[in-house]
C-alpha cells in the first residue's frame, strides 16, 4: 500500500497535532510527519495521546528530527545525538516509527572520514535506543546539497552496517544533487529489500551546489507520475509493498492529495 501524507500539521488545521491528525484523515490522507525540526514540541503524555489517535485512524506517523545535527563535527556530535535521541524518545511514545534526520556536513573531512563519523554516531545512537527499548528506526535521509553527507549509496552503506538504521529516500534531493536527474527504477532497485520504505517528495529548485528550495509538485521537477509508475511496477513489489510518501512541497495537503490522485489514476 502507498501511504501519502503531510510534512507537518496541514495548513487548514486550526489547532494542535491531535487536530492535525484528524484533519489529515478527514481530507483522505494516510500519513503525517511531525516536524520536530526546531524543537521537540510534544511531551511524553501528549505523545502517547497522539499515537493512540493516529493508530485508531490508521494514520502512519513519523518524525523529522532537528535540523541542527552534524555527526561529522566532533564538537557538535554530542549535542546532535541528544537532539536525535529526544526525538526518538517522543517518537516511541507517539508510535512514530521513522525518526528522520540529515546526518551532517563533510566540512573539511574526506568522504571516507565523514562516513566513519556518521557510522560511529549511528552506532552510539542505536546503543541508546536499544538500551531504552524505543521502537523506532533511525531514518537517514538522502540530502540535497553537495556539501551534505548523504548520497543514496552512503546512506545505504550505513544502513547495511548499522542495525536499526533505515534509508529515507528524498527523491527531490537526489534529483537536485544529481543536477536535475533521477533514475527512479535504479533508486527503487537499491531499496527493494526493505519491506517498508519511508520517502519524501516535492518539486525542487537547485543550483550547481544542489538543493535551493522545495517547490510545488506541478513543476514536474522531478516528475511524480513517473515515480508512481515505478512504485506500482510488479518488479518492485507493486501494491504489496508499503511505501510512505511525505509531501514536502509548500502546498502540503493540496500536493499530497494531488499525489494520491495520480497514484489512484495509475492503479485503475
Ligand atoms: Zn529532511
Image: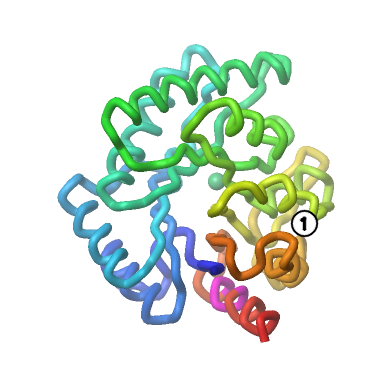
Q: Position of residue 215 (x, y in %)?
A: 66, 62
Name the residue: 74% across, 72% down.
Answer: 225
In the image shown, does 34 or 162 lie closer to the viewer?
A: 162
Q: Position of residue 183 (x, y in %)?
A: 82, 54
Question: The C terminus appears in which quarter of the rendering?
Answer: bottom right
Question: The N terminus appears in which quarter of the rendering?
Answer: bottom right
Residue 258 inside the magenta-drawn segment: yes
Instruction: Name the chief secondary structure element in magenta.
Output: helix
In the image shown, does 101 or 188 lie closer to the viewer?
A: 188
> Does 160 appear above or below 152?
above
Q: Which residue is mark 1?
A: 184
Ligand 1 within 8 angstroms of badge 1 C-beta? no
Residue 6 inside the magenta-drawn segment: no
Q: Position of residue 2 (x, y in %)?
A: 56, 68
| Drawn side of residue 246 relative to residue 84, left or right | right
Q: Residue lying at the far left in this picture: please name it.
A: 45
Secondary structure under the numbered disc 1 in the rendered image: helix
Name the residue: 31% across, 72% down.
Answer: 57
**Total numbered circles:** 1
> Does 50 appear above or below 112?
below
Name the residue: 56% across, 63% down.
Answer: 247
> Does 164 appear above or below 197?
above
| Drawn side of residue 48 relative to residue 139, left or right | left
Q: How is the image coloured?
A: rainbow
Q: Position of residue 149 (x, y in %)?
A: 65, 30
In the image shown, does 197 or 4 lie closer to the viewer?
A: 197
Q: What range is drawn magenta here?
A: 255-259
Amino acid at each position: 500500500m502507498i501511504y501519502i501524507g503531510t510534512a507537518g500539521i496541514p495548513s487548514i488545521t486550526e489547532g494542535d497535532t491531535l487536530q492535525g491528525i484528524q484533519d489529515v484523515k478527514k481530507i483522505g490522507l494516510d500519513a503525517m510527519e511531525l516536524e520536530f525540526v526546531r524543537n521537540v514540541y510534544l511531551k511524553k503524555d501528549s505523545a502517547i495521546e497522539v499515537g493512540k489517535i493516529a493508530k485508531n485512524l490508521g494514520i502512519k506517523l513519523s518524525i523529522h528530527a532537528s535540523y541542527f545535527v552534524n555527526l561529522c563535527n566532533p564538537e557538535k556530535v554530542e549535542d546532535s545525538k541528544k537532539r536525535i535521541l529526544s526525538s526518538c524518545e517522543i517518537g516511541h511514545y507517539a508510535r512514530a516509527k521513522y525518526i528522520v534526520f540529515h546526518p551532517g556536513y563533510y566540512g573539511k573531512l574526506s568522504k571516507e572520514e565523514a562516513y566513519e563519523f556518521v557510522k560511529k554516531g549511528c552506532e552510539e545512537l542505536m546503543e541508546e535506543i536499544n538500551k531504552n527499548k524505543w521502537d523506532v528506526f533511525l531514518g537517514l535521509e538522502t540530502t540535497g546539497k553537495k556539501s551534505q553527507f548523504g548520497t543514496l549509496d552512503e546512506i545505504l552503506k550505513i544502513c547495511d552496517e548499522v542495525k536499526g538504521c533505515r534509508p529515507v529516500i528524498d527523491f527531490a534531493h537526489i534529483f537536485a544533487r544529481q543536477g536535475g536527474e533521477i533514475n527512479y527504477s535504479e533508486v527503487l532497485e537499491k531499496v527493494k529489500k526493505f519491506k517498508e520504505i519511508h520517502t519524501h517528495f516535492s518539486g525542487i529548485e537547485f543550483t550547481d551546489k544542489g538543493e535551493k528550495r522545495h517547490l510545488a509538485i506541478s513543476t514536474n521537477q522531478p516528475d511524480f507520475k513517473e515515480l508512481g509508475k515505478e512504485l506500482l511496477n510488479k518488479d518492485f513489489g507493486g501494491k504489496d509493498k508499503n511505501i510512505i510518501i511525505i509531501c514536502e512541497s509548500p502546498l502540503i495537503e493540496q500536493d499530497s492529495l494531488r499525489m494520491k490522485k495520480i497514484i489512484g489514476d495509475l492503479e485503475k
